[in-house]
Image (spheres, coloured by chain):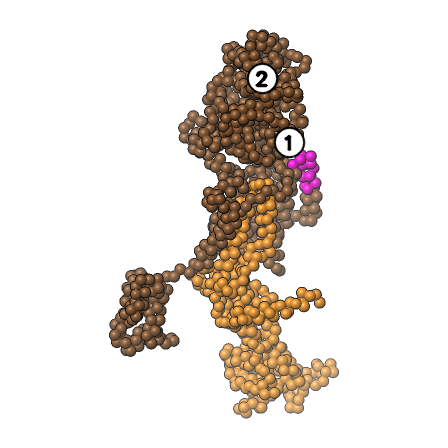
Chain colours: A orange, B brown
Amino acid sequence: MNPIDAVKPWFSSRVTRWLERRMPAVQEITLHRKNIFILPTGPGLLFLTATALIFVTAINYVLSLAFGLAFLMVSLFILSILHTFRNLQHLSLRGAGAEPVFAGEDAEFVVLLGRQPSHEHEMLELRFPGCLWSQANVLDNEQERVKVFLPSTQRGVLKAPRLTVQTRFPLGLWRAWSHVDLAMSCLVYPCPLQGPLPGLVGGTTSGKTESVKTGVDDFHGLRAYQTGDSLKQIAWKSLARGQGLKVKQFVDAVDDQLMLDWEMFPGLDYEERLSRLCYWVLILAAQDIDYGLRIPGAELCLGRGDAHRNRLLSALALWQGGAL
Amino acid sequence: MTYKQAQIPRLTIWWMLGALALVVVPHLLRLPVWISALIVACVVWRILIFVGRVGFPNKIIKMLIVFLALPLTVVEYRGTGAGLDAAVCLLILGTVFKLLEMRQRRDMLIVVSLCYVLTMVGFIYSQTILAALHALLTFIVITGALLTLQRDNRRSSLGSNGSLALRLVAQAIPLAIVLFVLVPRVAPLWTMPVPVSSNKTGVTDEMSPGNISNLSRSAELAFRVSFDNNAPLQDQLYWRGLVLDFFDGRSWRRAGSSMQSYEMIERFQSRLGAEKLGGAVGYDIILEPTQQSWIYALQLAEFDAPDILQDRYYTLHTDKPVTQRFRYKMRSYLNNETDMQLAGVLRARALQLPEPEGNPRSRQLAERLRAQSSDDLDYANRVMRYFREEPFHYTLTPPQLGEASIDDFLFNSLEGFCEHYASTFVYLMRAAGVPARVVVGYQGGEINPFEGYTMVYQYNAHAWSEIWLEGQGWVRMDPTAAVAPERISLGAQAVLGDQPGFLENSRFSMLRFRNTEWLNSLRLRLDAMDYAWNRWVVSYDEDLQLQFLEAIFGDRAKQALLYALGVSILLFFIIAAYFLLGGRKRDMRDKATRLYLSLLADLAGGGITRQRGEGPSDFANRVALSRPDIAADMLRITALYVRMSYAQDGREELFGQLSEHILALRLRLSSPWRRLVLRSFPALRA
């Protein structure tokens, strides 16, 4: 391992802690002298090199106007510190949250950028560490929305890391930036995993009705034969292939009720169960039926509609092991 | 894809092409034709790529261009001694080639940097006002190109981008000027090759019939002089350039001119012997580039420039050809005695005559006149009288002279320009054994009434002679003055103005319109401007810097320099920061709030504190209940404050009332001492 790589984590953790103290997480932050950093860019250094070359030539050939040119470039370089700084100064950032996403998708964090009447902000770039840049201008309107993307990997609450906001405007000679923590988070639902809905777990619910019913409309997969299954539903072809006695399973979406249950997927690990449940919640939400969810530690009654669906998905996203 | 590899926005390419065109155009005429053509072809190709007509050149074509163009350039410039020209040419070619493969931002940034450097390169060839304006425009366009990379291209238009670039450069100029004035100028770090143009101008080191009169066809400026005090009279203004003392029967040259290297002259420095009589005339010359290595001054000049040498003829030489406008200070002693002892080589040179001897009639004339004269001076005067009394003509267009040019001139044509008279005069002197030599340079000059300096033009070019007299040393004799005295007393333009051929080569020169009053005045004003530019900007150097600083800081200028520099940079930064970063102007509402809060602070001191979240009206009601004595005031103030906060117009009037009432109430609430403070220092009220 090379020494720089060895020092890097230590260094970045120091920087993170320092930032933590200097700029604690807040909902809204206005950038100013104390939280904007500024350094020359690569092109800035190239510009300075050209300036130095012009200066040396001016000395050697005693060219008064070349001195003038070199000084104009130095002056422009100094001046652009102020312009670049100004482009971030008084910019206010407010985290406006993010719509929930499924694990594996990019979370879209919405950041509201606001400006003072006296300031305009052109070509701002925002990103989370290692992610794609989003560009924004805050020129005409007092406030602009910008979406910043962050890939989600696992279900639960995705806490947004520090957001980098930077600008090179106007000449690209300097880069002014700030790392702000807008205390944003995004709910990440489990990644839906397609799969059959095994085992009719009817009758085990509140007792009112059997909430799960195999139907005849939509073929949905095969499951092992159980005594009492209709002969019409036996998958003869797979029996012929020597795959054992299977029953074709159909979901019947006629006005019915379905209670999804943790126990419907015996033998799978927890995350997979959650993913499958997630998939079925989405399937059922698209049908015209009432559905509910029972997982260890939580039971969500039958219902329908987007709010109901989101409630179920949230429960899946946030499941922590319940009473297990 | 990283930032550097990102595509170049289309708008940027337009700006870039514009900048490059501006940078390259002044060089196109100077460069060899095939290189100029190649440059234009490359730029056109890039434009065609841009509009989608052709593709980028492939590897083979690129290799072909580079491996053909570069060696050809080297061959083109080989042996010309113009190393710098070749380097500049390669730099331009390199930039243009880079343009052809400019795809990513990184390439673009390199082209931009090269363009900045090329802008500077232009100054090696010209530093006129026009060149400066051109460079400034170029600078703005290059900056504009850089700007387009950082802008949202859906939003930025040509106009908005241009105005932003203009604004940035304009804001940068004040500091640039301060740096220009204050940054210490250092001596060149190492010697550099200088571009020598083959286009030599002015007086040459060979004089044959016709080449001085040729100069009178030109209205170009030779140099400008400003005298420390009053300018000497016109007939004293003999600007000596070179002494020509070798005559081959037709032309005059420098004797042993191959030996006249700077190093040789340097060796003979110590042998100079001249007696300065009377006071000195101080002056300051800005010489136009001549591409020659001698410079002009009045008789017997004294100077302290290390890069100028004086030779045994008291003419002045520089260590390298004058390729840029060259400024030097001189003190001349118009009354002087030089070479009181004339011996050895110098004497032999001053008596040299062509072999075999020709011009028999002229030599007879010389012998006859010398025999009639009492001494050498008398003889010289007799020859001058001969020129005056015989029907000689002073003309720009003399007839061609035959083989025996002196005889032909003296006895056949009798028409000539100053070179004929000077040549003949020196010949006659030498023929009679009087040491004599031809001097070429300029005579006279036109005073610019606006700035009071003297302008010397090419048509002021002149040739005269110097003879050596026992007990007097070298004495100036100008036979032209005998033939056409007004040429010397009134100047060339007065005598030659009506002659055909005068200023013939400068058809569009404003000098041709000297008789139109307003045009002449415009010409003089433009020249004055150009002169001031050269004097204060182009030749701004250590001396001028010190002079300027002494005017401000007195004796301690040198020590003050660095402080002044530091302070002014800081000051610039602070002022710019104030305007750029301040920007939060407090409006009336803010001011009203501050006044209101100051009142609340006073009330809090009296034990009444506004609760969190309590609106001004609620608070006023509560105050009214607990302090009936100030209830009316408090309610009125609050009503005003609330109205003020929502009012669209008439805010100023409301603010006036509000501040009046608040002050009155606060005065009532304050202790007597505090009341005094509040009354005396309005600034402390808020």
Up-down: is B326 above or below B51?
Answer: above
Q: Which residue is mark 2?
A: B470
Secondary structure mostly seen in magenta is helix
Q: Image quadrant of residue B82?
A: top right
On the question of residue B204 being in view, the answer is no
Is residue B310 shown left or right of residue A140?
right
- For image coordinates 50% across by 29% down, the residue present is B280
> Vertical placement of A16 versus B470: above or below?
below
The N terminus of chain B sits in image quarter: bottom right
Q: Secondary structure at mark 1?
A: helix
Residue sitting at 55 percent across and 52 percent down?
Answer: B146
Q: Amino acid at mark 2?
A: Glu
Asked if residue B573 lies left or right of residue A53, the reply is left
Q: Looking at the rendering, which quadrant does residue A271 occupy? A: bottom right
Identify the residue under disc 1: B266
Q: Chain of mark 1?
A: B
In the image shown, does B525 or B443 lie closer to the viewer?
B443
What range is drawn magenta here?
A: B69-82
Residue B658, image x, y percentages: 30, 65
Q: Chain of mark 2?
A: B
Rendering coords of residue B593 (x, y %): 35, 67
